[in-house]
Amino acid sequence: MPPADPEIDAYEILGLSIEATDKDIKSTYRKLSLKVHPDRHPNNPEAAAKFHELNQAYEFLLDPVKRSTLDASRKIKLARAERFAAYDSKRRGLQDELEERERAFKKARVQKAQSEQALQEEIERLGEEGRRRRKDKEDALNKTEEESTRRSRPSAPAVVGQPPIGPHDTTVRLKYKLAAHPTLTTATALAAQLAVFGPVDTGAIVISLKANKKQPDKPPKFATALVPFERAGDAYACLCSAGKVDRGLESVEVNWVTEAEPEIIKWLRLQGNTSTSSDEPKNGEAPFSSFPTDPLSDGATSTPLAQPGLDYESVTLMRMRQLERERLEREILEQEAAEE
């Protein structure tokens, strides 16, 4: 007896649609029953069960009452499935819309943060530019005020008082190779060599012979000497004669012991720049006997002569000016020789 359970979907068992006719049902049943008939498959226990299921579905669909019940059930299921599909589609649409809103919200939040950061940076830039402009304006104003103050102040006197002679203002440092000056290893020999420039304090001369670091057993190659003259002008004359063969200072480096020009020399140089032509010696007259008229002559043996109107500073100044003239003449001659 065929089952009355409408849940058994005879359409699915026979592979038919709900629109199938009785003819379609019978034709399909014959084809399927031949494939699973127990007489054709005696060794297959599932064939009998499958054949029995086909018979139930066949009888179920040929019964109008049962078929109508099954059709109604299928229509209800189909409608429910369509409603669920519509719900799923709507749900998916809502979910997609929600996700799109979330993406738009995040994008707007990022753009807002970027805009706020850009605005803050622009505010800081404008503030920094304003501070820089105020500083430039203040600096320009201060500079103008300083310039006005400087112009309103009385001019400093062109000639200032003579600075005191320091303890090192008459001392020079000599550096030379012992191979070129083998005799200059004692204070006496060095004083005799430099006597051409003026009196030297022989007892205060300091000589340092630099030993060979790589070959300490061999004699030194270089010497350094600190030589104090009695007068700053004599020390300056020695400095200006550095490297001169005719003055006995070939290959000799001469510098101030402090490596800076003494203030007294700077002052005398300034006085020379502001002095008048009345300070110049007359034709044929030596400015002072301690500095020879001929730069090649030995001035150490001469004795200073007292001249009216010439004090020690003026005499020293004139000696320095003469040495400067010699140096300029020498540079001009060397330049002309190089051009030839």
Image (cartoon, rainbow, N blue to C red):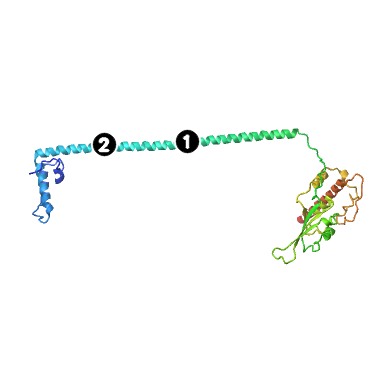
Tell me residue 30's x, y (percent). Answer: 10, 48
Locate residue 261, reporting x and y percent: 77, 49
Tell me the residue that label 1 is attached to. 115
Quadrant in the picture for residue 89: top left
Q: Where is residue 250, by image quadrant?
A: bottom right
Q: Quadrant of the N terminus?
A: top left
The image shows residue 316 at horizontal and vertical percentages of: 85, 48
Q: Residue at x 65, y 35 (%)?
A: 139
| Residue 162 percent across, percent down from the top left | 82, 43
The one of 223 and 133 positioned closer to us in this rendering: 223
Q: Is residue 212 above or below residue 305?
A: below
- Could you tell which of marks 2 and 1 lies nearer the N-terminus? 2
Q: Is residue 65 left or right of residue 123?
A: left
Tag 1 secondary structure = helix
Mark 2 and mark 1: span between their CA atoms? 41 Å
The residue located at (26%, 36%) in the rendering is: 87
Front in this rendered view, residue 112 or 232: 232
Q: Is residue 41 above or below residue 8?
A: below
Q: Secondary structure at mark 2?
A: helix
Q: Residue at x 46, y 36 (%)?
A: 113
The disc label shown at residue 316, or none: none
Q: Quadrant of the C terminus?
A: bottom right
Q: Residues within 10 Å of mark 1 (few under 14, many from 20)?
A: few
Amino acid type shown at disc 2: Tyr
The amino acid type found where label 1 is placed reads: Ser
Q: What is the crowding at mark 2: few (fewer than 14 residues within 10 Å), some, or many (at least 20)?
A: few
Is residue 102 shown to the viewer in this render?
yes
Q: Which residue is mark 2?
A: 87
